[in-house]
Image (spheres, rainbow, N blue to C red):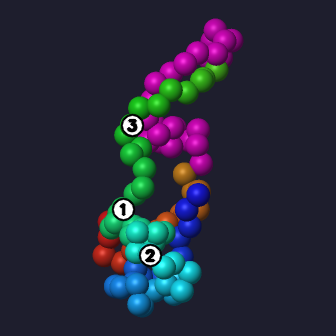
Amino acid sequence: MSILIKDMEMPKSCDECPLYTCMHNHDDCPLVPIPKHGRLIDASEKIRVQMYDDMTEDYHIAEMTIDDLLSQGWVEADAPTIIPAEEGEA
């Protein structure tokens, strides 16, 4: 499991790090920078979903993208943003 500490910049050195007193070896450092990002999902990736067909009154497996699910209203598009893009990122 990972966490994001909001508004915390990656320390430039161990001496500037608030965790430095806990960690004695640079190799043990748990901090990892989050690269610049936009949307953190590849919504064009195809996924398999189970769908109900009213005509045949049966279930079947369909292959579609997350964008397809969002555009058809089958998945809520207003879910909260967990890690927002930072200023200047798309």
Q: Decide: few, some or many residues near mark 1? Use Cα within 10 Å; few <14, some 14-19, many ≥20.
A: few
Magenta-drawn segment: 53-76
At 55% from the left and 62% from the top, the residue drawn is 2
Is residue 66 magenta-colored?
A: yes
The CA span between labels 3 and 1 is: 16 Å
List x then y, in percent, for residue 66: 47, 40
Residue occupied by mark 2: 25
- Nearer to us in this view, 41 or 51: 41
Identify the secondary structure beneath mark 2. Answer: loop
Tell which residue pokes out farthest to the bottom in this image: 16
Is residue 55 magenta-colored?
A: yes
Tell me the quadrant of the picture where the N terminus can be found: bottom right
Type of amino acid at the residue the image marks with label 1 = Gly
Residue depth check, mark 2 versus mark 1: number of the one nearer the observer: 2
Type of amino acid at the residue the image marks with label 2 = Asn
List x then y, in percent, for residue 50: 60, 24
Identify the secondary structure beneath mark 3. Answer: loop
Residue occupied by mark 1: 38
Type of amino acid at the residue the image marks with label 3 = Glu
Residue depth check, mark 3 versus mark 2: number of the one nearer the observer: 2
- The answer to whether 49 is drawn above or below residue 44 in the figure is above
At 36% from the left and 78% from the top, the residue drawn is 87
- Nearer to us in this view, 52 or 3: 3
Identify the secondary structure beneath mark 1. Answer: loop
Circle on res. 45: 3
Is residue 46 among what the camera can see?
yes
